Image (tube, grey):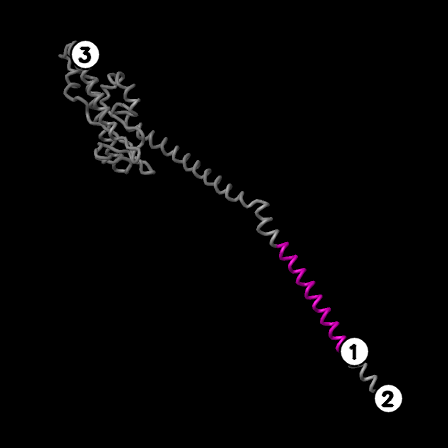
């Protein structure tokens, strides 16, 4: 049993060191406000969303006693039940770090590796509440996994949005069909062509009329000159 407790302490130290490294490169923030609460760690994604990670130790003294060689089996059973109840309450607390506006729709509850076996009784409830329970040593790998998966789906969402916009553009362009061009361009062009032809015909008719009038005016003058020449 002492080996299990030491494994839990080792996992806690490993998680702390890994979180410090992730803090340095900006993938994780410490003491992140979410609503009216402040979560111990928040994984930061490219779209600004956060993944809350609560790694505060559950029932530290009870864990030490649970893995103490001097603890009787009866007392261990009692401690297991108490620790399990503490984890249930902790699940309730971690639920407060889920905010649709700022976080992913889930959160992570990190527990000592030595308690992973005890968590099996509360996992179904945690899943219903969108809480993931994992041992300290597994958290860094989970963070990397979430970052990759979230990035993948973010790309998929961008592609889907692009497709939606292209479809919307196509729908708008489809409004410029043959009927549109016929009504907006062909018909006016035909009207203008017909109008031009009509104008030409009118001008031609006017020109003809003017020519006839000119001949009518000239002919009498020539006739009168002939009449004036005959008596001579």
**Left or right of 163 on screen, residue 66:** left
Say which label, 1 or 2, has the lower sequence index: 1
**Image-quadrant location for residue 105:** top left
Q: Are marks 2 and 3 in contact (CB under 8 Å)?
A: no
**Left or right of 207 on screen, residue 227:** right
Identify the residue under disc 1: 219
Q: Height in image: 71 above or below 141?
A: above
**Image x and y of residue 22, in percent:** 27, 34
Identify the residue under disc 2: 231
Structural crowding at the residue carrying mark 1, measured as other residues with C-alpha within 10 Å and reported as few (<14), some (14–19) or many (≥20): few
- Chief SS of the magenta region: helix
Disc 1 is placed on an element classified as helix
Identify the residue under disc 3: 77
Q: Is residue 121 magenta?
A: no
Q: Height in image: 156 above or below 115?
A: below
**Residue lying furthest bottom:** 232
| Residue depicted at x 71% and y 66% | 205
Disc 3 is placed on an element classified as helix
| Residue depicted at x 70% and y 63% | 201
Disc 2 is placed on an element classified as loop
- Magenta residues (range): 189-218
């Amino acid at each position: 049993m002492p080996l299990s407790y030491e494994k839990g302490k080792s996992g806690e130290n490993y998680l702390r060191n890994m979180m410090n490294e992730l803090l340095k490169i900006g993938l994780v923030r410490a003491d992140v406000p979410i609503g009216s609460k402040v979560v111990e760690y928040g994984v930061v994604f490219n779209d600004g969303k956060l993944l809350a990670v609560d790694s505060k130790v559950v029932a530290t003294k009870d864990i030490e006693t649970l893995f103490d060689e001097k603890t009787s089996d009866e007392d261990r059973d009692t401690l297991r039940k108490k620790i399990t109840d503490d984890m249930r309450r902790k699940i309730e607390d971690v639920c407060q770090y889920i905010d649709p506006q700022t976080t992913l729709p889930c959160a992570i509850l990190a527990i000592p590796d030595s308690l992973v076996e005890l968590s099996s009784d509360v996992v179904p409830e945690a899943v219903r509440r969108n809480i993931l329970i994992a041992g300290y040593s597994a958290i860094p790998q989970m963070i990397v996994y979430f970052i990759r998966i979230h990035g993948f789906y973010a790309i998929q969402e961008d592609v889907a949005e692009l497709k939606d916009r292209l479809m919307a553009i196509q729908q708008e362009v489809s409004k410029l069909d043959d009927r549109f061009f016929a009504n907006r361009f062909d018909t006016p062009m035909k009207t203008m062509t017909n109008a031009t032809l009509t104008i030409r015909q009118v001008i031609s008719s006017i020109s003809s009329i003017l020519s006839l009038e000119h001949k009518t005016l000239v002919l009498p003058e020539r006739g009168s000159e002939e009449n004036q020449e005959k008596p001579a």
